[in-house]
Amino acid sequence: MRHVERDFAGADSLFRGALADMPEDERCRWNDISSLLEGELAHRYRDLDCAGRAALESRWWWLAQPLYSRPGNDRRTEHLARRAMVRIQQGVRTLYGLYWDDDLRDVLLRYGWATFWTREPPASALVPSEPHVTGHLASPTFHFAPQARALDDPGSAKPEDWTFDTPNAREQYAPAYATAFESLDHQAALFRRADSCLFVAAYDLSSDTLFARHTVTAALALAADERTLALSRDSGVVAGVRALTTTAPCGPLVLSLEAVAPVERHVARARYGVTPPRLSPYHAAISDLLLFDPPDSLPATLAAVVPHAHGSTRVSADRKLGVFWEVYGVDPAAGAVAVSLTMARQGTGWLRRAAESLGLAGPRRDVRLEWQEVPEAASIAPRTLAIDLSGLAPGRYLLEVAVTPAGAETVTARREIRLERP
């Protein structure tokens, strides 16, 4: 009942207590997720003993949780509620005129139970037969299971390791709080703060008809594992870019940026792994590049840039683009550092190359800037710059900033950008 009533934290707690009181072999059967897995991962899981399965199950449920911003893992409590329904159905003749068997069990575990039924009369009044009963599952359903590679190395997981609309998915779930579940376009950047990492994420849903002008609750979650979570929240009416910041211990993490319109029951999410590079006290380092919409006076610090953060890596080609980064571990006493910024177009198509060869189009233009400067501080040296994009053709570009301290190795930060027609 707790799960059906959307008290997922309460349901999670009750299920954990009940499982803890079970004999080990019974607990192992209840926790079994073999019917939800496929391919090499399914074979690997079946070869494990109960203790080995428990470790894999814990990580799988952590990565399959739809929203880290909601207390309780409702994908897990849904599965355990389905397990309870399987127990209720065992040995019973179903509404479809069939007796319960393993095939029906696996279908229920993968896709849930029917929430309503329809009945059609017999096809012929002359031949005695039972009415035809059809069960209908909750909808819409989504696929939240991670790919095996995300399970093996969460810190290196890619956005494509989660796909909500996988055709013929092995398992599906219809959250009561979501009639739409889509990917969230955004940008995120990582900055160092002592022994911690500060993450900035920005998104813009104002052009999305599912969210525009609606009140949205957003969260930026950073999870090191199923027990360690750093979380920040934001709420407001969608009318432009919104940005969140969260601080977490530096190490392999799963980043989950989540936006929910609770009244309309629309959800957007971006999730992938991040592994901050190791920081050496003897070498310089550079942060990620944060894109922003430059005001008249360029902001000088990260805190001042965040309110102007751009909501994605897609930028209109008729405007200026602000770029912010930080350099760490450069001693001002060592002298000036060499800095370069390049913005080079990627993947020119054959039609463009043909037009250039015939003189029907000029060669593509790239941006390259070089200068020298002395950082103001050794611990954190922030830098902002505004680039005029008006002379660039739409397309995919690689933005790169390279910093070379005197007598030291070059450190580089890159970000792919897509310029779009205004």
Image (cartoon, rainbow, N blue to C red):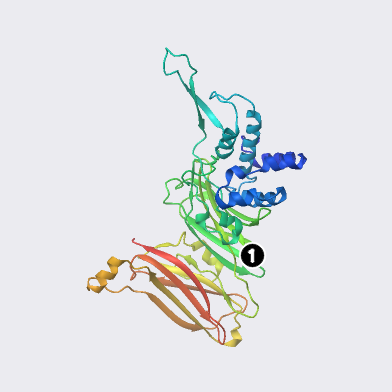
Q: Residue 322 location in percent, x, y?
A: 45, 69
Image coordinates of residue 364 in percent, x first then y, are 32, 73
Closer-to-camera residue (162/193)? 162
Residue 301 is drawn in which quadrant? Answer: bottom right
Q: Could you tell me which quadrant the C terminus lies in?
A: bottom left
- Residue 399 visible in the displayed image: yes
Looking at the picture, how far across and down is residue 170, in whole percent?
Answer: 53, 44
Q: Position of residue 330 (x, y in %)?
A: 59, 81
Q: Measuring 48% from the left and 75% from the top, which residue is drawn there?
A: 401
Q: Amino acid at mark 1?
A: Gly
- Under circle 1, the secondary element is loop
In the displayed structure, 281 sits above or below 138; it is: below
The residue located at (57%, 52%) in the rendering is 40
300 w.r.t. 244: above or below: below
Q: Nearer the viewer, residue 105 or 382?
A: 105
Question: What is the tally of numbered marks visible in this picture?
Answer: 1
Q: Identify residue for label 1.
A: 251
Foreground pick, 375 / 418: 418
Which of the 4 quarters of the picture holds residue 353?
Answer: bottom left
Residue at 70% x, 43% y is 28
Quadrant position of the N terminus in the picture: top right
Above or below, 63 relative to 97 = below
401 left or right, relative to 422: right
Q: Going 34% across and 70% down the picture, which residue do you hit? A: 392
Regarding residue 221, the answer to whether it shows in the image is no
Q: Counting other residues with Cα less than 10 Å from the Cα at mark 1, is it few (<14), some (14-19), or many (20 or more)? A: some
